[in-house]
Amino acid sequence: MLHGPDADSALRNRARELIQQGQLPDALRSRVWGGKGSGGPCALCSLAILHDDAEYEVAGPSGKESSLRFHFHCFAAWQLECIERNTRTLDSSTIAFLRADR
């Protein structure tokens, strides 16, 4: 897996796409498990999470029984997109509320 600013940007873009498509949740999960890689695919980049890699596991989107597994950098990119998405929603809601209050 690549690292650096270009890779980070690509991972954030991919996370944004998967969130918009409903394939990844748009909100952070309250429970996260970590451990050694299981060899399964990452929910964001689709590459195998090798046994030497850290693996982060979260509950899947509503209606899906399986959990989502991520590389560390992929998990971080997804978290940042969730935060940014929810901050934009909060800002829009706050602005609408303030305008309606006048």
Image (cartoon, rainbow, N blue to C red):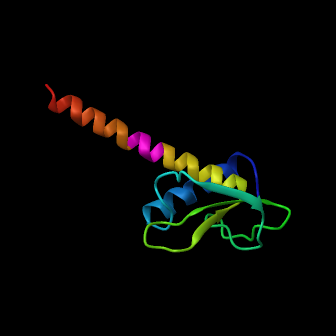
Left or right of 50, for residue 89: left
Q: Quadrant of the C terminus?
A: top left
**In terms of secondary structure, what is the magenta stretch mainly?**
helix
- Residue 43 on image: x %, y %: 61, 67
Q: Residue at x 72, y 70 (%)?
A: 47
Q: Residue at x 48, y 66 (%)?
A: 61
Tell me the quarter of the picture where residue 95 sits. Answer: top left
- Residue 80 on image: x %, y %: 56, 46
Residue 1 seen in this snapshot:
no
Q: Quadrant of the N terminus?
A: bottom right
Residue 93 lies in magenta, yes or no? no
Q: Residue at x 50, y 44 (%)?
A: 83
- Residue 58 on image: x %, y %: 59, 60
Residue 52 seen in this snapshot:
yes
Tell me the quarter of the picture where residue 15 sits. Answer: bottom right
Q: Is residue 37 above or below residue 94?
A: below
Which segment is the magenta one?
A: 84-88
Q: Is residue 46 above or below residue 99?
A: below
Q: Residue at x 58, y 68 (%)?
A: 67
